[in-house]
Image: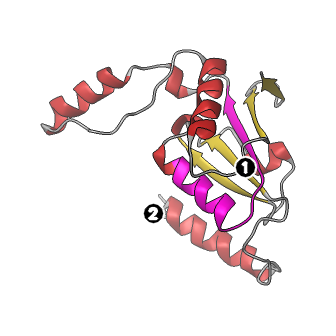
């Protein structure tokens, strides 16, 4: 039985990647002047599904693709220091964040550890409304200067297509 770990495979894969790597001189600001906020779900290859190459956009991922304080922090840096002008949000069908309530998970963690998480898990009940709420959070942030090019989408994990949320 192999004792090779996932991290071991990552190191080996990186060695192959580095053999043909040619992006060492790429500028820090993204070429398309865009930032993408997306869910961390392994079924979403964010770059591929949006047609992005390395260096095209900042891609910020978390559970649910929810706009949290930390996402806002990254967007502020992306716009103010690195010149991005557009923000694209991509959440998806069959998201795990639709399957639980924050308090249920917090109760289980507290029962297991004796400590209750102080942070919000940001579970949600309706996908398109959550996309709209995330857009509203960006629009309400006084530190993000460019707000006229924010669009939200839902990625269908069964078809591979995105549809815009209005």
Splitting the image into 4 quarters, where does residue 11 fall? bottom right
Dots 2, 1 in contact, CB < 8 A: no
Name the disc covering residue 19, or none.
none
Q: Secondary structure at mark 2?
A: loop
Residue 31 in picture, x, y percent from top left: 84, 65
Tell me the residue that label 1 is attached to.
146
Position in image of residue 107 (x %, y %): 23, 25
- Residue 81 placement, left or right of 164: left
User: Compared to 84, does 140 lie above or below?
Assistant: above
Quarter placement of the C terminus: top right
| Residue at x-position 45% and y-position 30% | 122
Asked whether the viewer can see residue 1, the reply is yes
Q: Position of residue 61 (x, y in %)?
A: 59, 47
Instruction: Assess disc 2: are there few (<14), some (14-19) or many (≥20) residues with their C-alpha within 10 Å of its C-alpha.
Output: few
Decide which of 107, 1 is in the foreground and name it. Answer: 107
What residue is rendered at 55% in x and 48% in y?
72
Marks 2/1: CA distance? 49 Å
Examine the rendered structure and indicate whether residue 43 appears above or below residue 105: below
Residue lying at 78% horizontally and 77% vertically, measured from the top left: 27
* 2 sits left or right of 41 in the view: left
Residue pointed to by mark 2: 3
Q: Nearer the viewer, residue 7 or 148?
A: 148
């Amino acid at each position: 039985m192999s004792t090779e770990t996932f991290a071991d495979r990552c190191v080996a894969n990186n060695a192959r990647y580095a053999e043909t790597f040619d992006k060492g001189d790429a500028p820090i600001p993204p070429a398309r002047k865009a930032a993408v906020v997306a869910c961390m779900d392994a079924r979403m290859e964010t770059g591929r599904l949006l047609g992005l190459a390395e260096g095209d956009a900042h891609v910020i991922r978390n559970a649910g693709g929810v706009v949290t304080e930390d996402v806002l922090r990254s967007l502020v840096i992306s716009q103010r220091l690195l010149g991005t002008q557009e923000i694209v949000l991509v959440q998806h069908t069959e998201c795990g964040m639709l399957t639980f309530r924050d308090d249920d998970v917090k109760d289980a963690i507290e029962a297991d550890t004796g400590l209750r998480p102080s942070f919000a898990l940001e579970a949600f009940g309706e996908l398109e409304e959550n996309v709209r709420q995330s857009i509203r959070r960006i629009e309400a942030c006084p530190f993000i200067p460019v707000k006229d090019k924010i669009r939200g989408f839902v990625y269908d994990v069964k078809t591979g297509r995105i549809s815009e949320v209005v």
